[in-house]
Image (cartoon, rainbow, N blue to C red):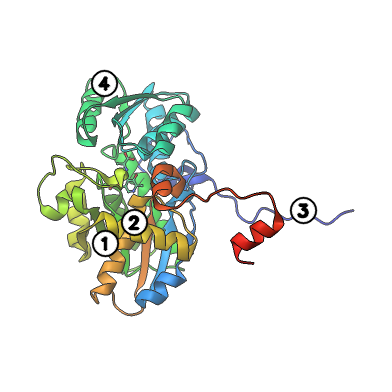
């Protein structure tokens, strides 16, 4: 007899089955799942040493389609199936469409996607198409696209799976439950994350609020939201008609969950501030080069804000900080190619290679 095969370390059943009691789904809703969730909370020792706090990265880029959207999409699509829907629609800056397309394929539903033409990172567009969504690029921005799909859903033609669908928020709130478990039964002191359409900050705050009851903990984090300086309606207190930023995922001028974000900020004693594209890219590079974690530019916005506030002396010494990294770096190949230098080719010769490597 050979050695015994070990039992699996843990069986993860995905967001719907793990948190079913708390998601507001009908009891008989099927679980449409790609085993999303259970993403790693990665310590960030280099950033921690730099700012004198205890910093962790909740790497949502490890979800099946490479972003946090899967956490809410599985719940929204399970709900759509339970309601007898045959088609999904969404507007997107990219990740929502990738996630909706994947879960629609899984569930056997049609998926229609409306995007701002030329403003979607290539990896995300490729995902939506390979999963079989019908993608319509429009000569407008995300906010225009959201208006169109809201209209389609209102006509009863399809289920809207943007985060204005409450089941998306229900699913996304589970990130807070996982963080508390991964920190050994406590909430962080500060939670940093990027803010675009503002569903995610709304959802994370809802999760922390429910967790105080679920886990009997009494402290919730301060929510620190980061908007890109050229697309910062909540910071400025007014719509931005022509939002601009290299962080295309959060290029949004009129967030649907604006009020939810303001409530999360105010109830948590937190803040929503702007970071420049240069600050976002500096954080993006720092995460990749010192922590070994490659996220997409928008995902680095929360860390950019953390670094900025640390510089200003606003991060208490030893604070437990969690930053959500919302999407994987491979989503946006064009951006990374602009940030690096592609190497010249060398002859296939050991000495030449050794010299180039300085070995
Ligand atoms: N980070 C990434 C990578 C995103 O894709 C998004 C939103 C956000 C942050 C902001 O989250 O909208 O809940 O405040 N992407 C949406 C999309 C808009 O269509 O993929 P939010």
> Which comes sooner in the sequence, label 1 or label 4?
4
Q: Is residue 358 left or right of residue 135?
A: right
Disc 3 crowd, CA 10 A, few/some/many (<14, 14-19, 20+): few
Which residue is disc 3 drawn over? 5
Q: Position of residue 140 (x, y in %)?
A: 21, 30
Separation (CA) of disc 3 from disc 2: 45 Å
Q: Is mark 4 within 8 Å of ligand 1?
A: no
Which labelled disc corresponds to residue 223? Answer: 1
> Which comes sooner in the sequence, label 1 or label 3?
3
Label 2 secondary element: helix
Camera-side residue of 298 and 10: 298
Camera-side residue of 347 and 36: 347
Q: Look at 50% across and 61% down and name the residue there.
A: 292
The answer to whether residue 192 is seen in the rendering is: no
> Which comes sooner in the sequence, label 3 or label 2?
3
- Contact between labelled residues 4 and 1, with CB atoms less than 8 Å apart: no
């Amino acid at each position: 007899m050979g050695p015994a095969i070990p039992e699996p370390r843990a069986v993860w059943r995905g967001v719907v089955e793990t948190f079913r009691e708390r998601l507001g789904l009908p009891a008989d809703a099927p679980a449409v799942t790609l085993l999303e969730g259970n993403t790693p909370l990665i310590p960030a020792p280099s950033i921690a040493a730099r700012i004198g706090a205890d910093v962790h990265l909740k790497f949502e880029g490890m979800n099946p389609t490479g972003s946090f959207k899967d956490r809410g999409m599985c719940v929204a699509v399970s709900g759509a199936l339970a309601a007898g829907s045959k088609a999904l629609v969404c507007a997107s800056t990219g990740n929502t469409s990738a996630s909706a397309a994947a879960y629609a394929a899984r569930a056997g539903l049609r998926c229609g996607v409306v995007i701002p033409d030329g403003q979607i990172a290539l990896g995300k567009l490729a995902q939506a198409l390979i999963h079989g969504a019908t993608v319509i690029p429009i000569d407008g921005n995300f906010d225009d696209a959201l208006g169109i799909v809201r209209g389609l859903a209102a006509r009863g033609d399809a289920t809207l799976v943007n985060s204005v669908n409450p089941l998306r928020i229900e699913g996304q709130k589970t990130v807070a439950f996982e963080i508390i478990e991964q920190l050994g039964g406590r909430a962080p002191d500060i939670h940093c994350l990027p803010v675009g359409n503002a569903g995610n900050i709304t959802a994370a705050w809802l999760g922390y609020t429910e967790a105080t009851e679920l886990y009997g903990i009494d402290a919730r984090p301060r929510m620190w939201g980061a908007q890109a300086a050229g697309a910062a309606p909540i910071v400025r207190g007014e719509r931005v008609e022509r939002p601009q930023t290299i962080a295309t995922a959060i290029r949004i001028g009129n967030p649907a969950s604006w009020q939810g974000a303001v409530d999360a900020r105010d109830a948590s004693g937190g803040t929503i501030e702007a970071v420049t594209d240069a600050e976002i890219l500096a954080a993006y590079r720092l995460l990749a080069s010192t922590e070994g974690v490659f996220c997409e530019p928008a995902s680095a916005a929360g860390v950019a804000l953390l670094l900025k506030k640390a510089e200003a002396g606003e991060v208490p010494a030893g604070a437990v900080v969690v930053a959500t990294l919302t999407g994987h770096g491979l989503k946006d190949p064009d951006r990374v190619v602009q940030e690096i230098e592609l190497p010249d080719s060398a002859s296939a010769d050991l000495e030449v290679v050794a010299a180039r490597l300085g070995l």
